[in-house]
Image (cartoon, helix red, strand yellow):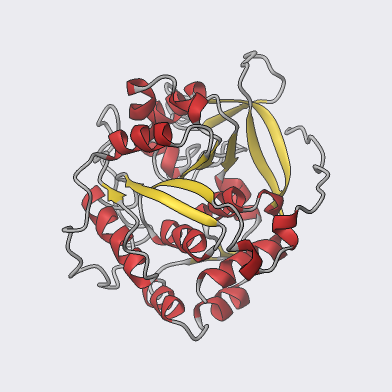
Amino acid sequence: MLLDVGTLAHVKTPRETATRAERSTMAKKLLLVDVDCGLDDAQALMIALAEPTVEILGITCCFGNTTVENVCRNVLHVLDVCERTKIPVFPGASSSLLGGVNPTFVHFGSDGLGDAGETANVGLEHLQKEHAVNAIIRIINEHVGEISLVATAPLTNLALAVKLDPELPKKLKNLYIMGGNLEGKGNTTVCAEFNFYLDPEAAQIVLNEFTCPTYIAALDFAYKHALSKEFFEKWINQDSVKANFMKRITTKTQLHDIGFVSYDAFAMAAAIDESIITEHLECGVHVDLRGEFSRGMMVLDVKDRLKKKHKAYLMKKCDLEKFENVMMSALQ
C-alpha cells in the first residue's frame, strides 16, 4: 500500500497569473530534452515549443519508440511543423548499455509517428555532429544550476553522461522523467514499463546518481489521468497546422479503452508549470535488475528500508483542467 504525503499547499506565483503575452517577457525557463520521439514525445515537445516562458537549449535523441535515426528525423520534422528549426538536435544512443534488448517498434508504429509517412522525406543535414551525451554535458556545464532536464526516453544518454561527468547532477536545477511504475504493473512485461524495460541498468544509474530534485511521471500515474475521447477529438480538430499534423499521425494509433493517454506530456507539463502536479509521493526508488518477471520494474521504498539519502518525487495527482489547457495551447 502506498503512503500519501498529502496535497501540497500552493500559492499562485506571478508567472501563473500572468497572461500569455506577459509571460513571454519574463525570464525564460531553460530546458534540455532527451527523447525517443514517438507520438507522445512529439506531443511533449509541442507543449514546450508553444510555451513563451520556455527556451529549449537542445534536444537529444535516444533509441526507444523507434530507431535513433528515425527519432532524429521525427524531432526535426516536429520542429519544422512548429517553425522552430533553429533548436539544435543531437543523435545519441542506438541501444541499451548492455545491448541485450531488441525492441519491436509497434506501439506508435514502426517509425514512431503512426506510420503516417510524415518523415519519409526528412533529411538529416540539420542534425548536429556532436553526440547527444557530449551535448548534455556541455550544455549543462554552460548553464550551471539553471537547466531542467526532461527525459522521456530510455535513460541511456543520461546514464552515459553521468559516468563521463559524475558531478553533472549537482549542476542541474532538476530532472523530470517519464518512466517506471508505481504498482508493479507493466505495459511491456508483466512488471516493467517500456522506458525502464528497454534499459534497466541506465534507469538504475540515473535514479541512483542524479541527486538533483527528481520528479517522475510513472505509467500508472499517466493511466490514472487519461483524458476523454471527446477531448482528444476536440484537440486534434482545431483549425491549425499543428493540429492537422497531430491528426495525421494519430490516425492509426493513440486512444486506449480508458481514453487518451499522452505519457510524456505529463513530465513536460510539470517541468513548465509545477502547479499542474498537485500531489507527490516522496520516497527512495530502485530499479530491479535481476528478477525473472520484475526486471525493469521501479521499486518504491516507502518505508525507507534502503535508507537512500536521495528521494524522488513521484507524481500522484494532476490538475486536469490545467493540463488540458496546456495540451490545447500546444496545437494552436
The reply, left or right, for residue 313 in relation to residue 61 is: right
Considering depth in this image, is 193 or 149 the residue closer to the camera? 149
Residue 16, given in percent of the width and then of the height, sits at 72, 58
Q: x and y percent of residue 57 in the render?
A: 41, 48
- Splitting the image into 4 quarters, where does residue 212 fall? top right
Q: Give coordinates of residue 303: x percent, y percent.
A: 72, 20
| Nearest to the observer: residue 55 or residue 36 | 55
Of residues 51 and 313, the one nearer the viewer is 51
Q: Quadrant of the N terminus?
A: top right
State the residue at coordinates (58%, 80%).
234
Q: Is residue 153 above or below residue 233?
A: above
User: In the picture shown, does residue 156 fall above or below 84?
Assistant: above
Left or right: 158 as drawn, with respect to 185: left
| Residue 58 in sight in this render | yes
The residue located at (69%, 68%) in the rendering is: 19
Q: Of residues 294 and 84, which is closer to you in this image?
A: 84
Instruction: Count the marks.
Output: 0
Q: Residue furthest front?
A: 25
Rendered view: 222 above or below 97 = below
Visible in this render: residue 156?
A: no
Position of residue 114 in the picture relative to residue 148 (left or right): left
Q: Position of residue 264 (x, y in %)?
A: 50, 53
Q: Residue at x 33, y 28 (%)?
A: 160
Q: Quadrant of residue 2?
A: top right
